[in-house]
Amino acid sequence: MLSLGLTACGDNGSDEAGLRDQIRTLQAEKKANEDAVTAAKAFVAKVTTYSYKAGEHDFGWVEELQNEKVRSQFEERVDDLKKAIETSKTSAKGQVVEAMGRVVDETQVEVLAFVDQAITDPSGEVSVEESSITLTMKLDEDSGDWQVDTLTFLNQVDS
């Protein structure tokens, strides 16, 4: 079917080459979107999952942020977050229920993730909070891995 479309465009070789380039670009962008969204979902699950028990709340994800300004903003808050989690004796399990990407180019994808976070209080009661997070994912061309450049919580639960 593609070859029919290319043939129907005319016999001009440059038109055909241009269409082939567009197809390659679209295929690369589709793959970039799929890979970036997959990486973003895994990252968001880490960010939204924690436990008050000693050694069970890992904020190592902060070090994975590639944007120095964003990373330093989160680093400033980590101790307060840990204290709040330990004091409230809560645990949470985050699950991305939907995520979608908008391709900027083959090396950058903006991702919007919708999250359900099951929060367990000291009595064992569970409540589910819904939130959304945007991430800017950038491709590390050396490793081929998608990295989080920026992270923004769009709506947070008030404490």
Image (cartoon, rainbow, N blue to C red):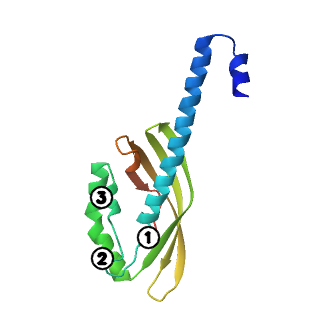
From the viewer's perspective, is residue 55 above or below residue 73? below
Determine the CA span between mark 2 and mark 3. Answer: 19 Å
* Residue sitting nearer the eye, 113 or 143: 143
What residue is drawn where x is 59% and y is 24%?
20
Task: Compare marks 2 and 3 and give the one earlier in the sequence.
Answer: 3
Q: Which mark is residue 152?
A: none
Identify which amino acid the numbered label 3 is placed on.
Glu
Element under disc 2: helix
* Residue sitting nearer the eye, 145 or 107: 145
Quadrant placement of the C terminus: bottom left
Query: Residue 30 placed where, x, y %?
Result: 56, 40
Examine the rendering and report whether any part of residue 133 can be seen: no
* Residue sitting nearer the eye, 45 or 131: 45
| Mark 3 lies on residue | 63
- Residues at circles 2 and 3 in contact by the CB criterion of under 8 Å: no
* Left or right: 13 as drawn, with respect to 50: right
Query: Residue 151 placed where, x, y %?
Result: 40, 53
* Left or right: 1 as drawn, with respect to 128: right
Quadrant placement of the N terminus: top right
What residue is drawn where x is 51% and y is 51%?
37
Query: Residue 156 placed where, x, y %?
Result: 45, 64
Identify which amino acid the numbered label 2 is placed on.
Lys
Q: Report which quarter residue 158 is drawn in.
A: bottom left
| Mark 1 lies on residue | 49
Query: Residue 24 placed where, x, y %?
Result: 55, 30
Identify which amino acid the numbered label 1 is placed on.
Thr
| Mark 2 lies on residue | 83
Crowding near the residue tagged with mark 2, few <14, some 14–19, many ≥20 C-alpha atoms within 10 Å: few
In the picture as drawn, the residue positioned furthest to the top comes out as 12
Element under disc 3: helix
Q: Report which quarter residue 89 is drawn in.
A: bottom left
Task: Compare marks 1 and 2 and give the one earlier in the sequence.
Answer: 1
